[in-house]
Image: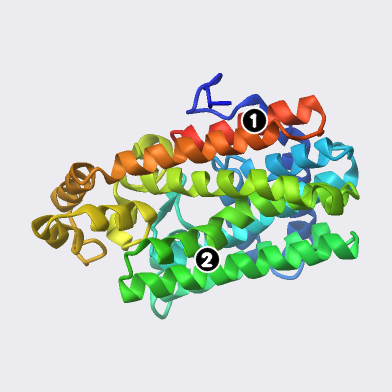
């Protein structure tokens, strides 16, 4: 089966829109409970909870909870049960942890069209003319807000089986391992496919798609039976997910992605797209590509790098791979005995993450 868009790639499909209501309500509830408890200690503790809530509700797509939900339903579980909603909320809360920390490591001043957490608290420090370095304060608070999200995520998912907790532990480890490899590769300026693919799999592919699918099956008590199927489906979808992110990070529209155009180029991210361009570049084009990640890149520099990436054919190489991966994932769905409603939703999610525009 080949991918065909049946929805607007600039908005969430029904496979997401139909399930987010109870998940978002639970996220609001848990944040309200924790906020009310801690502001009694000090009213200043309202600020980190406010920052975390703004991060979660400032435009997140809820892709990870949706993959969890439909895997759970497809495995015979009740997606409306308390344990399922808590697990879905935990997955989104863990994503907030990763975003808060990621923006510090990448020096990203914006997220989803709003100041990132570290930037928000840097601005607060400056506005109040507090003592010390404003940016260091902002980064410290962002790390703590991320840690807060991590703890709350663990609270939401802790009342589950040993199998579920083993998957949850692996998920958390993989996110951190992938992030370290990302930071290391950026420092070493390693622009090769092997390195880019390791980062892709561990930083995004597993935690965004495979592990939510595994958790959905595990909470339904069907992990042993369906782990192979969900891995075969989730692995190509996870890769396609990140490859689309790579393209959006270089060519995406700032108004829809919520991040400055070419942000990945300024940050020097060692993506598969950049690696593909390096593999195909002439000596002159290599000189342009080697400016990726250098301080002081302006709009003209970014435009020239974008031109070189297109000239090398790397953009089309990645687009073709996204199509091949998505088609392979959809073919896997044809082999399953998962119920048809869940299959339709998983099919829609796979196409959405591959071809979305934000």
263 or 279, nearer to the observer = 279
Left/right placement of residue 353 relative to residue 165 reads left
Label 2, on which residue? 101
User: Spatial distance from mark 1 to mark 2, Cα to Cα?
Assistant: 31 Å
Residue with the most extreme front position: 335
Q: Position of residue 17 (x, y in %)?
A: 66, 29
Left/right placement of residue 175 relative to residue 287 reads right
Neighbour class for label 2 at 10 Å: few (<14), some, many (≥20)? many
98 is higher (above) or lower (below) than 344? below
Q: Position of residue 36 (x, y in %)?
A: 77, 57
Neighbour class for label 1 at 10 Å: few (<14), some, many (≥20)? many
Give the mark nearer the N terminus: 1 vs 2.
2
Q: Nearer the viewer, mark 1 or mark 2?
A: 1
11 or 325, nearer to the observer = 325
Q: Position of residue 292 (x, y in %)?
A: 24, 61
281 is higher (above) or lower (below) than 237? below
Residue at horizontal 19%, vertical 51%?
A: 305
The answer to which quarter of the image holds residue 278 is: bottom left
Q: Quick one: SS at disc 2?
A: helix
Label 1, on which residue? 347
218 is higher (above) or lower (below) than 42? above
């Amino acid at each position: 089966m080949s991918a065909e868009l049946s929805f607007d790639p600039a908005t969430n499909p029904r496979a997401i829109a139909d399930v987010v209501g109870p998940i978002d309500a639970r996220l609001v509830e848990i944040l309200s409970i924790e906020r009310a408890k801690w502001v009694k200690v000090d009213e200043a503790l309202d600020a980190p909870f406010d920052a975390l809530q703004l991060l979660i509700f400032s435009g997140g797509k809820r892709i990870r909870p949706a993959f969890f939900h439909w895997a759970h339903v497809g495995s015979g579980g009740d997606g409306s049960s308390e344990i399922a909603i808590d697990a879905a909320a935990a997955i989104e809360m863990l994503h907030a942890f990763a975003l808060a920390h990621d923006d510090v490591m990448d020096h990203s001043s914006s997220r989803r069209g709003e100041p990132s957490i570290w930037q928000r608290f840097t601005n607060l420090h400056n506005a109040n003319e507090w003592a010390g370095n404003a940016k260091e304060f902002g980064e410290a608070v962002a790390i703590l807000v991320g840690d807060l999200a991590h703890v709350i995520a663990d609270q939401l998912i802790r009342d589950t089986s040993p199998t579920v907790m083993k998957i949850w532990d692996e998920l958390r480890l993989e996110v951190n391992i992938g992030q370290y490899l990302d930071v290391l590769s950026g420092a070493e300026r390693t622009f090769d496919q092997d390195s880019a693919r390791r980062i892709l799999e561990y930083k995004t592919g597993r935690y965004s798609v495979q592990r939510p699918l595994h958790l959905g099956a595990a909470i339904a008590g069907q992990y042993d039976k369906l782990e192979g199927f969900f891995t075969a489906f989730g692995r190509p979808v996870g890769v396609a997910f990140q490859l689309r992110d790579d393209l959006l990070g270089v060519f995406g529209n700032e108004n829809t992605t919520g991040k400055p155009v070419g942000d990945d180029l300024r940050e020097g991210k060692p993506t598969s797209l950049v690696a593909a361009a390096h593999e195909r570049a002439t000596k002159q084009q290599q000189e342009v590509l080697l400016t990726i990640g250098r301080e002081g890149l302006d709009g003209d520099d970014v435009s020239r790098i974008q031109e070189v990436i297109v000239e090398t054919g790397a953009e089309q190489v990645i687009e073709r791979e996204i199509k091949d991966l998505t088609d392979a994932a959809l073919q896997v769905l044809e082999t399953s005995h998962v119920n048809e409603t869940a299959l339709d939703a998983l099919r829609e999610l796979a196409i959405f993450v591959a071809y979305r525009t934000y």
